[in-house]
Structures are given as structure tokens and as C-alpha cells.
Image (tube, helix red, strand yellow):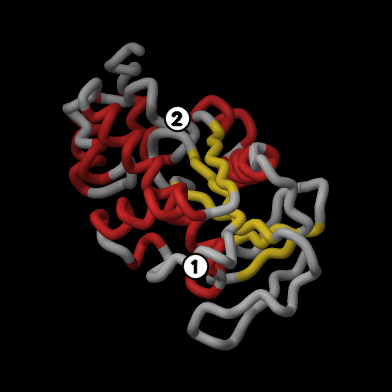
């Protein structure tokens, strides 16, 4: 389905959408070399506006955490879901992302009549849906979803850092930074790594998995 591109830079009201509840959906973790991909779906409450919603990547960690709590407190309903490393390897990262988004929407306590998804693709859903390029900058519900997804995944990285301190997950969040690649070269891959991603595949071709679950 072609994406709907909005030309205005600021976040916009949803007057152009069908009547009924509207959910925003976004993901975090498509690019990293390790860990699950996380998706969130949010239906905001117009009676309780949340100031400062924006693309999660443009916010500080402190501000994201503050908004995370406010979204959970004020939204009509929220849902956070994931697709595992095993599912990423079985399906590929795109399809695993779509699966996580499906799960997030299905987990909403209230059923939306329409779903807005950040990016240029939408998962298969039971209701109408629309992809919006840069939606996390333009649509408050998508911004809220992006914040929930990123905070959730970042917290997961902080937790697993204690189990695998040699990789530095708390710092790079699983992305292929120079420090992460150096750790891969020194220690091999661990069970959290996505073995179908090229840098991990290359390391595993020359050395067995170094750390067991």
C-alpha cells in the first residue's frame, strides 16, 4: 500500500482520518545486530493531551523515560510486543517487524478502527491501515508508540548487559558500533546475536559461538 506523505513539518490533527479510534504504531530495533525487534501501538486520549511527543530518536533518554510514564498514564490504551531473535532469523527482519506490529495492535484493549504505521509498509491487520513516512515526526500517536518501543528495547539492553558485559549492550543498544564489532571479533557471538546479520555471520564463520545461553 503506498504511503501517505504529509508536507507539513509539525505534528498534525487527525481530522482527515475515518471516524473511530485511531492507533499509532512504530518499532524499535530493526537495525541492531542483537536482540528482539520491539513494536508498540498507542491510542491516545484527546481529553488528555501529552506535550512534547516527538520521534523518540530526537529526545534525550531522560525525556523519553518521562514521556513513557506519561503515555502509559494518559493514553486510552497501549500495547507493546516483540519478535524474538529466533523469529527474526526464521522470517527475516522485515517480516519479523511486521509480526511484532501485528502483535502490538492485537494486544490493544480497545479495537481501533484505523491504524497509522510509521514508515512505508504496513502489517496485515483486521482493520484499515496506512503507512506514513516520518510518521513519528508528524502524528502524535505514532510518536507515542515510538517512545514506548524504544524505551522498552533500551531497558532490555540494559538488563542483558549484566549477563553479557563483554559486549556493552547498555551502551550501543545492539547496534553495529565500532565497540560492538570489536567485542564480536574478540568474543564471538552470543545467543542474543542475530546470526543472519552479516557482521555476526562473518564472525561465526571463523569461530564458534563463544557464549552459551
Where is residue 111? Give x, y as percent: 74, 47
Where is residue 99? Give x, y as percent: 65, 39
Q: Tell me the number on the disc at residue 49.
A: 1
Quick one: SS at disc 1?
loop
Q: Tell me the number on the disc at residue 185.
A: none
Disc 2 marks which residue?
Answer: 195
Where is residue 40? Give x, y as percent: 54, 47
Say whether residue 35 is left or right of residue 5: left
Residue at the image position 17 percent from the left and 28 percent from the top: 166
Closer to the camera in the image, 28 or 16:
16
Quarter of the image holding residue 110?
A: top right
Residue at the image position 18 percent from the left and 27 percent from the top: 165
The answer, for residue 201, to whether it is visible in the render is no
Say whether residue 206 is left or right of residue 111: left
Quick one: SS at disc 2?
loop
Closer to the camera in the image, 193 or 26:
26
Quarter of the image holding residue 139?
A: bottom right
Amino acid at each position: 500500500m503506498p504511503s501517505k506523505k504529509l508536507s507539513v513539518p509539525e505534528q498534525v490533527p487527525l481530522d482527515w482520518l475515518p471516524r473511530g479510534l485511531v492507533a499509532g504504531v512504530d518499532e524499535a530495533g530493526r537495525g541492531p545486530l542483537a536482540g528482539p525487534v520491539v513494536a508498540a501501538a498507542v491510542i491516545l486520549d484527546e481529553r488528555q493531551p501529552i506535550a512534547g511527543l516527538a520521534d523518540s530518536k530526537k529526545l534525550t533518554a531522560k525525556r523519553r523515560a518521562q514521556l513513557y510514564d506519561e503515555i502509559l498514564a494518559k493514553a486510552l490504551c497501549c500495547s507493546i510486543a516483540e519478535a524474538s531473535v529466533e523469529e527474526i532469523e526464521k522470517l527475516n527482519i522485515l517480516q519479523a517487524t511486521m509480526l511484532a506490529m501485528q502483535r502490538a495492535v492485537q494486544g490493544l484493549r480497545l479495537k481501533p478502527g484505523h491504524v497509522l504505521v510509521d514508515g512505508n509498509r504496513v502489517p496485515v491487520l483486521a482493520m484499515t491501515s496506512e503507512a506514513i513516512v516520518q510518521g513519528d515526526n508528524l502524528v502524535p500517536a505514532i510518536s507515542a508508540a515510538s517512545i514506548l518501543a524504544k524505551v522498552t528495547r533500551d531497558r532490555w539492553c540494559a538488563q542483558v548487559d549484566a549477563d553479557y558485559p563483554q559486549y556493552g549492550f547498555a551502551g550501543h543498544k545492539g547496534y553495529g558500533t565500532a565497540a560492538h564489532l570489536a567485542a564480536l571479533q574478540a568474543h564471538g557471538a552470543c545467543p542474543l546475536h542475530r546470526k543472519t546479520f552479516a557482521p555476526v555471520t562473518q564472525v561465526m564463520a571463523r569461530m564458534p559461538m563463544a557464549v552459551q545461553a
